[in-house]
Structure formats: C-alpha cells, structure tokens
Image (cartoon, grey):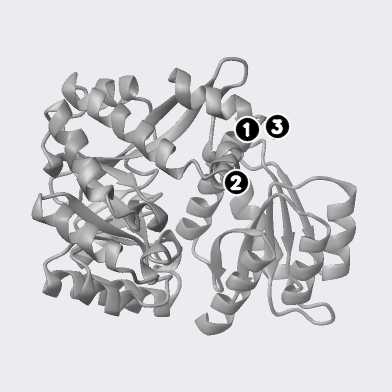
Amino acid sequence: MNSLNILVVDDHPLQLKQISYQLNALNVKNVQCVTSGEAALEALSARAFDLLFCDLNMPGMDGVELLSQVAEQGFKGRVVLVSAMENAIISSVRWMCEALELSVAGVLEKPFREQVLRQLVQSCAYQCVDSSTTKPKIQVSDEEFLFALASGQVINHYQPKVDFNTQQLVGVEALARWQHPNYGVLYPDTFLPIVERCGLQNELFNTVMLNVIDAINTQQLPCATAINVTHNELEQPRFSESFLSLCREHGISPSMITLELTETEVYRDSSNLYRNLARLRLNHVGLAIDDFGTGYSSLSKLSQLPFTEMKIDRSFIQMFRTNAKHTHIVASICELAKRMEIQLVAEGVEDETTWFSLKSLGVDVCQGYFTGRPMDIQALNQQYL
C-alpha cells in the first residue's frame, strides 16, 4: 500500500492529523493534506492521486461542489466520502458521484474508526493493482469478433458462488471472455458494443452455453452454472424449445443451468416471455432475477414469474454497513426471500466484515471478490476440485 498516492481534504486540522497518522501507520507514505476545496483542486491539477478523502461539510467550497469540479477535471482515482452528516445526505452525494462517473470507494464517518479506514485503503490498493495491469482500450472490428465467435476464441470464465454456512462451492456464473490471439483476454466492455450493434446476442448466448456444456461433460464443472440471458432472447417463440433440445442433444440435465435476467430486462411484458420461462421451470431450469432492487417492478415480477433465485444488487451490498437505509433494504430483501422460499445471493462481497454481516442476516450464497474472482476453468478446477 505504500505506493498509493492519497489526497485528504478536510477543513479541520485535527481530523487531517488523525487521518494522516493512521495512513502512515498503514504504511501509506504518499499522503498530501489540504484544508480547502480550492487547495484540493490545485493539488489534483499538479499530480495524479489514487484516492481522494473528501470532507463534505467545509466552509467556502463544500465537498459537493468540490466533487463536481473534480469530475469535470476527469479524476480517475477513487473517492472516500468523509462526513458526520446524516446518512440520507451521504447517500445522495454517493449517487451524485455515480452519475458523474466518480468511483466511490466508501464512506468514512466522523469520528472515524481505524478498522473502516484500513478496509477502505486495502480495497483501493487492490483496485489499483487491477487497474495497473489493465491494458489500454483496444479497438477491434466487428469482423474480428464474428471470426472469434466462429473460431472458438470466445471462452468462459467462472465466478464462484459460495454457501455462507458451509463455505463450500455451490455454483458458478459463466462470464464471456475473448481470448484474442494478439491482445490476450478481452473483457465484455470491448465486445458487447459489437454484440448489441450487430444483433449477436443469440450467438453469444449459444457460445457461452456450449462452453458450459463442454465443461460439464468433461467433468470440469461440478455444480450448477448461471448464464446471463437477455429479454430479447426470451421473447423468441422457440427459445425454451431450442434450449431444452440443446441440453437433450448433449446429454446434460437442464437443472444444471440457471438463467439470469436483470431486473430491467424482465420489466417488459410479452406472452413469449411468460411461455418460455414457464417451460424452462417445468424442466427444472433455474431462473434468477439479477440486480434485484434496481428495476421498476421488482415485487410484481416476483409474483408473476417463477424465479428460484434473487441476486441483491452490489450497490446495496457495498453500502449496507455504512448506510442505514441500505441496511434496512437488505434485511427486508432477506425476509422477503425467506418467505417466498427463493434462494438469495449477495453480489459484490469484498471483505470479511461484509461476509459475516450478510451471513448473520441469513443470506444463502456469496458471489464476490472475497470468495473468488472470475477465473478460467483450469483455475476453477485447481481451486475447488
């Protein structure tokens, strides 16, 4: 962590001294402290920082205005909101940051706790390692990706899903990756625009599905596997028939597969959607509602569609320990899932404290960096088989 560059902005000299002292105790050497928003902007224009601790309640330029100007400058580091204000205000500022495309690492409440500060800095250090190894934006053509789909360059990585009680692997989520011959592994942000522009959703789904089938038949996937599916695919009259035929053709049980739909995707109604989902459930295919809590009609869709799994959106998980409203929302989702007898999955779990807090609420399954990042099939087997 000693390579992190941190800027702390707070108008209170004692707070600056305390945070600086604790950061040095965490072996963070590159710490600059300023007492105003104007001084912070000057510092940010002079050098790059990985992490910005920003007090919200300051005279003159307050933290809200400072963050707005920081976003205009194109700040690429992460932000920690420092405040003694009520949670509703902090939550509003956090959503403002998201709208401004500022990455918020977390909240440091006053008086701050050393443990919270340590977790924030550690999380940022991991993120900085990831970003330092991330390759620059790569430009690829539509034709290149079409060839990749046809030639087997699109592979699956798998993120583990771990039971909170047994700490055993109970499932994985299949995530598409492009194994480019020149650039190495490319992530969806590179090729999803091509998929959407060229209408290749079906082709991508089939590729991911065939990769899963191959891994199951070669005994490399010992558990249920989740695959993302779009609303457009589920509106196709023969989607369920084609899916079930593919399972029969390759001799795998449909119960080995869970299809994940985002809440915004399941918002639109259609007879084909209901028919496909009903047929899939009749054949024991799992159905998960992803990003639960962020869409427009969560409760009505839960009553109308045969979901077997709910995935709490990561935005609630990452804030629920520091935001009382999010704490209540997560607890309510847990109670709802139990009453409806639907398995509950928490996404975005990144530290031990969050793990134990969610376990105490009765969440069933963890999916996050704390229990495992997405990995190729070889790494999955080495770790879990």
Mark 1 is surrounded, within 10 Å at the Cα level, by few (under 14), some (14 to 19) or many (20 or more) other residues, namely: some
Which image quadrant is residue 246 in? top left
Q: Amino acid at mark 2?
A: Arg
Q: Nearer the viewer, residue 328 or 288?
A: 288
Of badges 2 and 3, nearer the viewer stands: 2
Measured from the top left, where is residue 43 in percent x and y?
86, 55
Q: Are marks 2 and 1 in contact (CB under 8 Å)?
A: yes
Q: Which mark is residue 139?
A: 3
Which residue position is annotated with label 1? 142
Q: Is residue 21 visible?
A: yes
Image check: 173 left or right of 124?
left
- Compared with 239, 250 (above or below) is above
Snapshot quadrant of residue 384 = top left
Which residue does the numbered mark 2 point to in the structure image?
197
Q: Nearer the viewer, residue 282 or 356?
A: 282
Which type of secondary structure does the marked residue at label 2 adopt?
helix
Q: Amino acid at mark 3?
A: Gln
